[in-house]
Amino acid sequence: MDEKAELDWRSIGSVERGERNLSLDSLQRVSQALGVTPAYLLEVTKERNELPEKELMIHEIIYLLKEKNIKELKYILNLIKEFFEYIDKA
């Protein structure tokens, strides 16, 4: 995502850790790279502290999957199905 937004990965990391804030320009670039509006990012940030841990994990999984192509997604889906079948049998 840092390449798409044309931002340094260290800058992204410091924002994620809450060490610094994004400028409006950087917020716009990040939102475009993620395919969402700046308002969505601000709302997600606001609500993040209110979400239960399970919901935060689901959001993180979705974020990771958005970067994958269809072939990778099919492979991941099959892995997940096999994993749950294994767990159900245990």
Image (spheres, rainbow, N blue to C red):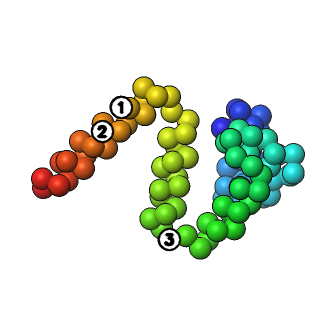
**Label 1 crowding class (10 Å Cα cut-off): few <14, some 14-19, many 20+?**
few
CA–CA distance in space, label 2 to label 3: 26 Å
Q: Is residue 9 left or right of residue 57?
A: right
Q: Are marks 1 and 2 in contact (CB under 8 Å)?
A: yes
CA–CA distance in space, label 3 to label 1: 28 Å
**Label 2 crowding class (10 Å Cα cut-off): few <14, some 14-19, many 20+?**
few
* Secondary element at tag 1: helix
Can you give x and y, in whole percent of width and height, for residue 68 in the image?
51, 33
Q: Residue at left 64%, top 68%?
A: 47
**Label 3 crowding class (10 Å Cα cut-off): few <14, some 14-19, many 20+?**
few
Q: Which residue is mark 3?
A: 52
* Secondary element at tag 3: loop
* Secondary element at tag 2: helix
Can you give x and y, in whole percent of width and height, for residue 28 in the image?
81, 45
* The residue positioned farthest toward the bottom in the image shown: 50
Going from N to C along the chain, the mark reached first, 3 or 1, is 3
Can you give x and y, in whole percent of width and height, for residue 29 in the image?
79, 41
Q: Which residue is mark 1?
A: 75
Quarter of the image for the N terminus: give it: top right
Name the amino acid, label 2.
Leu
Q: Which residue is mark 2?
A: 79
| Picture layout, residue 18 above or below residue 8 | below
Disc ID at residue 64: none
CA–CA distance in space, label 1 to label 2: 6 Å
Quarter of the image for the C terminus: give it: bottom left
Name the amino acid, label 3.
Pro
Going from N to C along the chain, the mark reached first, 2 or 3, is 3
Q: Residue at left 25%, top 46%?
A: 83
Q: Is residue 82 visible?
A: yes
